[in-house]
Image: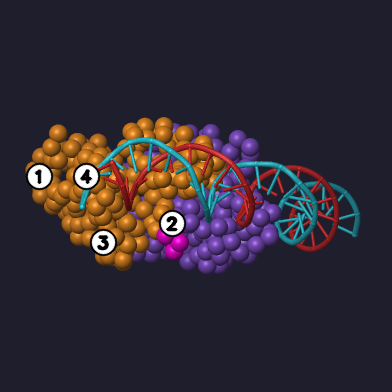
Chain colours: A orange, B purple, C red, D cyan
DNA sequence: CAGGCTGTGTGACCTACGTCACTTATATGG
DNA sequence: CCATATAAGTGACGTAGGTCACACAGCCTG
């Protein structure tokens, strides 16, 4: 399926746009392709866009002072990724976004999102619900962190994204679960 | 300051409503008072409303199978609290909301929020940004969980809400930090 | 095919934090 | 004003998971 249709169906799940409205919205997205290992957002840079994944897989992650990596999210097709904190508050990135595999995305700039949201009520509706879902998911993950041990969280992750097991190296899974590579290997 | 003004100023920070629009919005909120220790949302019940705190302090928390409590959020004045997962997806509550102190709130039902959001574009704008902020905060907390030890998180919490230290018993702080009461006491 | 990478497994040891048990202090309500 | 919760500190000990070190497999690339 082509980019246009993927985005159209994705939006249609939460908002109803006329064909003309969707065409107008789509015209603000920029298609982009990246290679495995390439960096899309690097900590310290300014962040202009959010990225809608068409194919492939991204990771958004934080690197601490000891150079340890913590993965906030794996972004699979129809997921959105960016450093939302930096994007929304117009500050420098503290989060990185890299390609785990070759990846095609659609980019939407912060300014264009806000423009579309104010011009088309249903677009604002769509983005409200996108974030609502993200917020609820983040809270669930937080609870899982507090409540469950590494093994439990690992099983939870595999249930949530079975595809991940094949695509993603174990050290990245460990960085998502917040445990060391060695601990994960011993589960 | 009275309820009306508190909400008005709170909304005005992210959305511009005319006085008539605000009056209309405000008419959908129901004022409610609770006593210290009272439960507002109980796991297993259905959830109809979200709560805007005018005065006092709420906690939203999860109780696991071992009856251990994990606090998702302390809700101070001008914060919103509910079981948003249950509220949005119309399922039974898995999160509880209780009063830490006597508390005055404004309740808004799920149906009325959606009605207001669809009727008034700026209201949808307001709620989009409320969730955006919540989402970013949840991600930050998640990172802090993965990256920092209990002591670091404790200091972070006290910096973020200095008032909390006096109002809230230490066992609740521990439940927020995800450590045992004893460990917190030893910091 | 040799020499790097990167990914993965495993042993030995260390540490932050949990659990349980007991004590002390502070509220609160009958 | 006493009785009973509730809150808070502390010691002893257990354990999940971290860290470091090394081994080995499957790759690319020269």
Q: Residues within 10 Å of mark 1 (few under 14, many from 20)?
A: few
Instruction: Give the x, y percent position of residue A149.
Output: 55, 41
Q: Residues within 10 Å of mark 2 (few under 14, many from 20)?
A: few
Instruction: Give the labeled residue for mark 3.
Output: A47
Q: Residues within 10 Å of mark 3 (few under 14, many from 20)?
A: many
Q: Label 1, label 2: how many angstroms apart (C-alpha)?
A: 43 Å
**Main SS type for the magenta part?**
loop
Instruction: Give the x, y percent position of residue A168.
Output: 34, 40
Report the chain holding disc 1: A
**For this view, does A120 lie left or right of residue A146?**
left
Which label number is shown at residue A68?
2
Instruction: Give the labeled residue for mark 4.
Output: A103
Q: Label 2, label 4: how many angstroms apart (C-alpha)?
A: 24 Å
Q: Comparing marks 4 and 3, which lies closer to the viewer?
A: 4
Q: Comparing marks 1 and 3, which lies closer to the viewer?
A: 3
Q: Comparing marks 2 and 3, which lies closer to the viewer?
A: 2
Q: Comparing marks 4 and 1, which lies closer to the viewer?
A: 4
Instruction: Please report the residue visible at 32 percent of the width from the left and 56 percent of the height from the top.
Output: A96
Instruction: Give the labeled residue for mark 1.
Output: A23
Instruction: Please report the residue visible at 24 percent of the width from the left and 47 percent of the height from the top.
Output: A36
The magenta span reads A64-68
Q: Nearer the viewer, residue B49 or B84?
A: B84
Instruction: Please report the residue visible at 23 percent of the width from the left and 50 percent of the height from the top.
Output: A51
Q: Is residue A66 above or below residue B98?
A: below
């Amino acid at each position: 399926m082509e980019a246009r249709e993927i985005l159209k169906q994705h939006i249609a799940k939460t908002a109803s746009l006329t064909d003309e409205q969707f065409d107008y919205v789509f015209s603000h997205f920029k298609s982009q392709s990246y290679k495995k290992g390439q960096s899309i957002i690097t900590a310290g840079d300014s962040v202009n866009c959010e990225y809608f994944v068409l194919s492939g897989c991204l990771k958004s992650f934080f690197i601490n002072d000891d150079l340890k990596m913590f993965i906030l999210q794996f972004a699979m097709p129809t997921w959105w990724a960016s450093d939302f904190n930096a994007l929304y508050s117009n500050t420098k990135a503290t989060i990185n976004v890299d390609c785990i595999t070759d990846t095609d995305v659609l980019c939407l700039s912060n300014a264009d999102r806000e423009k579309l949201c104010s011009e088309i009520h249903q677009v604002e509706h769509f983005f409200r619900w996108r974030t609502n879902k993200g917020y609820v998911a983040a809270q669930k993950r937080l609870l899982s962190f507090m409540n469950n041990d590494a093994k439990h969280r690992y099983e939870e992750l595999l249930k949530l994204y079975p595809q991940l097991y094949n695509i993603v190296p174990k050290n990245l899974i460990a960085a998502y679960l917040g445990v060391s590579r060695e601990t994960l290997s011993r589960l």
